[in-house]
Amino acid sequence: MNLLTSKPTTLRSKRQPSQRSPLLYLTLLFSLLIFLFYFFSLSPNSLLTAQLSHSPKCPSLGGDKFLGYAPHSGFSNQLMELKNGILMAGILNRTLVVPPVLDHHAVALGSCPKFRVSAPNEIRGEVWDHVVELIRSGRYVSMADIVDISSLVSSSLVRVIDFRVFISSWCNVNLDFACHNEFNAQPYLLDKLKECGSVLTGVKGNVKCLYAVSEDCRTTVWTYQNGNEDGALDSFQPDEKLKKKKVSYVRKRRDVYKTLGPGSEAESASVLAFGSLFTAPYKGSELLIDIHESPRDQRIGSLMEKIEFLPFAPEIVSAGKKFALDTIKAPFLCAQLRLLDGQFKNHRKATFQGLKQKLDALMQSPLPIHIFVMTDLPESNWTENYLGDLARDSNQFKLFFLKERDDLVIQTAKRIVDAGHGLKFGSVANIHDGTDQIKKDCPSAVIPDVLLYIEQTVCSCASLGFVGTAGSTIAGSIELMRKFGACSS
């Protein structure tokens, strides 16, 4: 009713009872119950999140420009993405934000060949949530703690900054990342990081200082200096079977420098955020990045040569060599047998057959043949297969393997934590102690799992040869280590 135009009512000598509908009372009661339920269900953390809705601001960070990406899947894929991140940062002249090692398959991409993958914003959000959980639980380990990138940085081929150092400035979080207990004592810090992540991952859309790359392997193959093919159709397109499933994507070849470099919309942003940087050859094309040479850019050409092989940290290499020299003490064969994960469990017979053929060829060597076994099959399950046969035949074969609780593995993990290689890249004044290290006044809650990296190093030292599981990225990494003489360096 409009009070300005209504007519006055006639006063009655006897007040009439209200004719309000019972539905009105029910509606008001229901609304009140919803409000009370919402209010009391809010935790202090979620209330604080609401208060942080306009945070964070876009910091200057010294005028530098940064590049981040969303790693995923197993360690070998994450290592490949690190190399691609280094390459993209070099081409675009940005500082690479080095991420942590994610838990095995904590974040999955999907299938590029089937044009069915997580969108860039989605995978960036999943990675951020997982990284915050790694920080909260004291399990954070930087890729730069495990992989030695010091020579790349010292040669000025690329600039890098540790993720923790970066978000300390960007999110204005002042804490010692080695002390996970700070999150228990100050729970608002987690909310602050999550709110900051909603901006940095592009979940809230692009802001002035962030450019969230929307292209992925469904639409784009990144190239660099490939003549006049920028914008051309890629050779790999959805086939008729996929089109029947209403896959409408069209893949084009895009020059990353022209698209995201000087003169582009992305160039002015302080942070350039990619989604996945996973790529692989497929049907005559690359799934995302087709950059293998740079004849007109000598600096990028040198960078590509150096990232072909990135060694493990010195502590890991030293541990692998020590096991080979002090425990095996003789020429040996390495057998990398992936038998449980994904497609590999269906090819167990072929995997064992390849090992048997190699051992048959070595039977002329002095016996017993020493074998380092690197496998995901628990020793308790060896009884009814070829590994069990080898273990029982001690006259001809002597098997060696490492376990997570072995002293060598534990001590190496502790040395990795103490070295803190990742935190050497970048500095933040308000938590800096003047020694190029962020202060670490308390130990990490959980030591990192370094077994896989030590095993690969041991395999690189196998002088009698190497037998790997066909199609395994771990086998490919070991072959690369052997090619570059990781054990002899």
Image: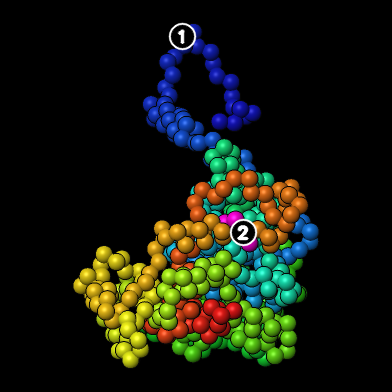
The residue identified by callout 1 is 14
Q: Residue furthest left?
A: 384
Mark 1 packing: few (<14 Cα in 10 Å), some, or many (20+)? few
Please state the horizontal and vertical placement of residue 188, each as a whole percent of the image.
59, 40
Q: Look at the image and tell me in which quarter the C terminus lies.
A: bottom right
Mark 2 packing: few (<14 Cα in 10 Å), some, or many (20+)? some
Of residues 370 and 457, which is closer to you in this image? Answer: 370
Please state the horizontal and vertical placement of residue 211, each as a whole percent of the image.
66, 65
Left-right relation of 101 to 211: left
| Residue at screen point 27% across, 76% down | 394
Please state the horizontal and vertical placement of residue 398, each as a whole percent of the image.
33, 76
User: Which amino acid is tagged 2?
Assistant: Ala
User: Which amino acid is tagged 1?
Assistant: Lys
Please state the horizontal and vertical placement of residue 168, each as a whole percent of the image.
67, 52
Of residues 61 and 28, which is closer to you in this image? Answer: 61
| Residue at screen point 34% across, 82% down | 369
Residue 106 to residue 367: above or below: above
The residue identified by callout 2 is 419
**Quadrant of residue 485 within the rendered picture:** bottom right
Whole-angstrom CA distance, mark 1 to mark 2, is 89 Å
